Image (cartoon, rainbow, N blue to C red):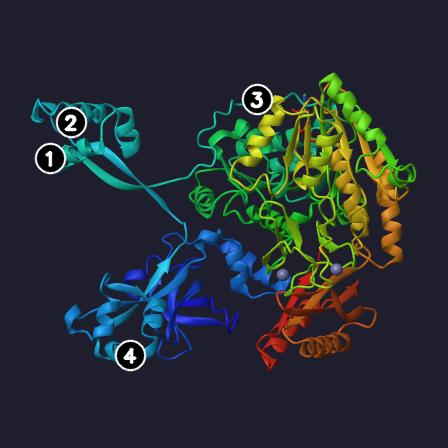
Amino acid sequence: MIARVIVDVPTAQTDRLFDYEVPHEWRAFARPGARVIVPFGPRRIQGFVVALEQTSEATKLKPISEVLDPLPVLSEELLELGDWLAKTTVCYKVKAFFAMLPAALKTKVSKQVERKAALDLLPLPLQTLFADHDVVPWEEARSLMKQDLSLLKTALDEGAVSLVYKVTEKGAKKTAKLVQALPKQVEDIPERAKKQRELFCYLQENGPLLTKDALQQSKTTRATLKALIEKGFAEETDVEVYRDPLQHEQIPPSAPLELTPAQAAVIAPIEAAIENGHHEAMLLHGVTGSGKTEIYLQAIAKVLEKGKEAMMLVPEISLTPQMVTRFKARFGDLVAIMHSGLSNGEKYDEWRKIHRKEVKVVVGARSAVFAPFTNIGIIIIDEEHETSYKQEETPRYHAKDVALYRGRKHEAPVLLGSATPSVESFARAKKGVYRLLSLRERIKGRPLPEVDVVDMREELRRGNRSMFSGQLLQALQARLERNEQSVLFLNRRGYSTFVMCRDCGYVASCSHCDISYTYHRAGNSLKCHYCGDEQPMPKTCAECGSDHIRFFGSGTQKVEEELARLLPEAKVIRMDVDTTRKKGAHKQLLEAFGKGDADILLGTQMIAKGLDFPRITLVGVLTADTMLHIPDFRSAERTFQLLEQVAGRAGRDQLKGEVIIQSYTPDHYSIQLVKSHDYEQFFAKEMQLRKQGSYPPYYYMALLTISDTELASTISAAQKVARYLKESLNEETVVLGPVVSPIARIKDRYRYQCVIKYRHEPKLQEILDTVMRHYLRDATNKKLQISIDVNPHFF
Ligand code: ADP
Ligand code: ZN
Ligand code: ZN
């Protein structure tokens, strides 16, 4: 038996398959989709079996060293998906395979040195090395023997020590001890050993139990248990346990609501597709609070009735406890949860529940689209316009594309939902590529909140230099008096809290990346958000020596301080990356706000979605236009989407909602149209501009970023790439650049980019593939990197 293996070689990445012999002991496990450890040159590396063959063209095959998975981690379908992903996003297959698996399975193979001969037979330096352990990590051995590596080599040659390869799966499995009583009589335990008798009886009645539970509940000690085990009355075994992220939650079950006529009309075609097992892409356009989530829940219930599995994708940022609770309440233990707040181990546990078919529903962020289900009945993507569905590293895939691919394979409907669909999706729905379903009103005829736009330039003219307009301040005051709650939203994107010298205008920026440092109050330090570099806050300007160096911009902390000054009686909860860093903090803060512990919830993007609290009657947006000025053709779309989302937090229950948007460009259509909540008009306006500028959805785009440590070689490589693209692509395809990237340098690497705009380019993948393989291999400079992003989300 011969296994064809795709190997994980970081230096010379390749999609080439290598043949290995499958030794007898691994025959049962070496199946397509299983991870294996194989010898590769002098090393042991990881790979995936992609096929089994009887014969091979290669001579002298080496055997597989180990099969890591008793049950293949990639199904036939996922292996195919990996191929497709590699092809469409232009990356190496092994990268695509790993992207589909939880991080805990990205096994590292580490090299170790093991002592084979008696300690005192070894030369002295080696005796020191092995003084405490018989096995020492290779790196440690090497650094200790730095002076005399030949000694180590001789020992290896003589067989006094040998090299071993060890597989380390970081944070993978978690085990616990299970204790159970053995079939014996309690009378056989001496009467004076009262504690042991008690424990034994307890175990007989309640066991098997996790050891720590057994000890706790029967109020005995470890010593007692040990004695019991030694006498042969009980037995302890290691078991694998799942880390349940919601272990200590009591979630009351919820029953399906009776659908409104509008909801019923929308769910009918979805249920029909589920019933008939037929693939169709649908776009559910429903205003905030129109009951989309209830539709999702009932569609999933229908899928479960059919004995199939359901995938529910939500943006990372709205995977809030409130959201998760709604699914757990309806489907209980049938739900696995996957999001970045979980540890690697927890993620792996949730993944395994799916892999072992212990759950039927997954609620998760982007990567949950790879959930190893085998009988999918529906894939739902909520807030389908969200940018977090696009992965910003290799493979640069979009969850929507993967969902559509899997939906076709499984003959299952794919439901995209949003109050503000992406322009591209809505255009597809208008053309009939997706079936358009609409919910135009909020549940129970509740009105959408009234929106006011405040011109902040006018405020300045009137001498108000505060971050709060008079109108917003008054509205906040009124909520305090009526004991209602407010949400204050500060758009972090496009904003930065940079440090600037007031005398000379010098801005402190990272010496490795052409980007200004962000001030962090917690450590009174400066941090680069691209490379993580951290510096103490300077006391004087590096340019002119002045001590008038201050931080600028408007972070949440600054708003909080100003609030304390303007409305000293208001209780404020602040939610941003700093206050939610600790595990569970996000949830605690929201719960506190829900309980009414605060009057104002102040936060960034993370409070824009999913919040559903009845007493919120005011939403204030501090500056609406920070994002508008990002040089990206989607900036107006993102502004509209975000404002509409934030506005949707107000007046969701009986109390009427009000929204106040502060802006320096109040007449911009993306801000004005939020007033009338008019998505369709926004869409029409935006499409007009997209057409004029030859942007998606009229044109497709691809972005190539060329980077290197030397400026000159970056430019010449970029020029070479651009020339090749211009020569090989169609005539009506436009190749822009090379130009310097918006951030000209990151982590000491210079960056240039080319943008491709095309309508019909059947050979594009092939051409980009050539760029990836050919230009990198040919480069005399090994440091050259080319990243390729088909349908980029950011420029
Ligand atoms: P969306 O996901 O569109 O924002 P939700 O599904 O969260 O809307 O619904 C908004 C509110 O209306 C929620 O509190 C929800 O429980 C309630 N709701 C949804 N459907 C119904 C229904 N058919 N009858 C009564 N209440 C409903
Ligand atoms: Zn200065
Ligand atoms: Zn940096």
Amino acid marked by disc 2: Gln
Whole-angstrom CA distance, mark 2 to mark 4, is: 56 Å
Image mark for residue 286: none
N-terminal-most mark, 3 or 1: 1
Q: Residues within 10 Å of mark 4 (few under 14, many from 20)?
A: few
Where's residue 464, x and y in %? 86, 36
Q: Which mark is residue 231?
A: 1
Q: Amino acid at mark 1?
A: Lys
Whether residue 448 is visible, yes or no, is: no
The N terminus sits in image quarter = bottom left
SS category of the residue bearing label 3: loop
Ligand 1 within 8 Å, label 3 CB: no
Q: Which labelled disc corresponds to residue 196?
A: 2
Whether disc 2's CB lies below 8 Å from ligand 1 is answered no
Q: Is residue 736 above or below residue 341?
A: below
Nearer mark to the viewer, of 1 and 4: 4
Location of the C terminus (image quadrant): bottom right
Residue, disc 3 = 255
Q: Which residue is mark 4?
A: 153
Q: Picture coordinates of residue 238 (x, y %)? A: 27, 42
Q: Residues within 10 Å of mark 2 (few under 14, many from 20)?
A: many
Q: Amino acid at mark 3?
A: Ala
Q: Quadrant of residue 696?
A: bottom right
